Image (cartoon, rainbow, N blue to C red):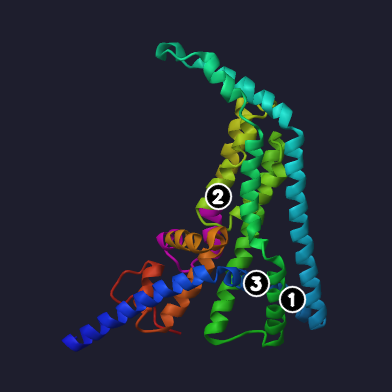
Amino acid sequence: MGPEQIEQRTQTIALLVLAAVALGAALWWLRPVMIPFVLAVFFSSGLMPLVRLQMHRLRMPRGVAIAATLLLSLVLFTGVGLLVSASVRQLAASADRYQAEVAGLTAQVAEALPLERFGIERSGILAPLSQVPVSALGGLLVSTTNAILDLLSNSALVFLFVVYLLIAASAGPQRREGLVGQIGRQVERYLLTKAAVSAATGLLTWVVLATIGVDLALVFGLLAFLLNFIPSIGSVIATLLPLPVVIVSPDLGTGAAVAAIAIPGAIQFTIGNVIEPRIMGSSMDLHPVTILLALILWGMLWGVVGMFLATPITAVMRILFERLELTRPLAGLLAGRLGPAGGRPAV
């Protein structure tokens, strides 16, 4: 490679870096519009197999199939909202019982600590700790739930986008070819597989916590389902979320309290690290470090919504990078192939 070619490649790389920075700034600035649109794209990708099933297997008209799919989606999302609202009310109704348990727990902890050696009075520690409001526990659950339900903060705009995208997609050929078809099939496979695996995770978490006797077991199962869409971090948060309720629940013994954290944690680990990789295989073709970095980057740009969408968006970027010779090494880097060839040949 001659000096002119090296200089030209350097200029091209510098321009690509500047373009990436400008694109990131634009995505952050346009997030009020881009977030609903991208959400609608992925929602419609997940719903499209159901529309096709009704059209081709049940011989339903296109309009009826789309209307039935949208109605089912609205019922599910409304049910989720009602479930969360009822659970928060249940927590508020039990606030006095939890407050008394917090006071007793802090007294036990203070008795076990050798405070006199450091010249600290037990009453000075017990008084403020026993007054810790249980509303803080409710605030933790509410804030976590609200962060997840921010996905629907622009529900009317998302719904409108979904309607138009479903109409456009259902009017085209059943199997799309080329780049668009490759991206569509990969995203659909990821969403359907992830939804099935997340549903199993949420169901098992709910059954385990309900069997042990943990309050709000159904809500924790729902949150385990939703948080499973966030790679790595989501499973950790879902495992630890019941911890405050377990600590302040007077009816749970030590063994039950440990089991309420350990068993869901084992479920998350087994499904996330053993079952899901076998089912999904290498469909995303992304290195784990790439997924973690994408989680951080899209979380910075779009918040919780970006964390939910980080994996499929990055997978789409990898497919696009493979199509261009200049960016093919970057596609290989995202997939963890660090050899000189970089990405695979374009198909």
The amino acid type of the residue labelled 2 equals Ser
> In front here: 200 or 168?
168
Going by the image, does 114 lie left or right of 205?
Answer: left
Crowd band around label 2 with a 10 angstrom C-alpha radius: few (<14), some (14–19), many (20+): many
Going by the image, does 214 lie left or right of 8?
Answer: right
Number of marks:
3
Going by the image, does 88 lie left or right of 229?
Answer: right
Look at the image and say whether residue 275 sits in the magenta stretch. yes
Helix, strand or loop status at disc 1:
helix
Residue range in magenta is: 267-292
Height in image: 251 above or below 298?
A: above
The amino acid type of the residue labelled 3 equals Ala
Q: Earlier in the sequence, mark 1 or mark 3?
A: 3
Residue designated by label 1: 51
* Mark 1 in CB contact with mark 2 (< 8 angstroms): no
Crowd band around label 1 with a 10 angstrom C-alpha radius: few (<14), some (14–19), many (20+): many
Helix, strand or loop status at disc 2:
helix
Residue designated by label 3: 40
Q: Can residue 101 be seen from the camera position used here?
A: yes
Height in image: 141 above or below 128?
A: below
Residue designated by label 2: 235
The amino acid type of the residue labelled 1 equals Val
Q: Residue at x 48, y 60 (%)?
A: 300
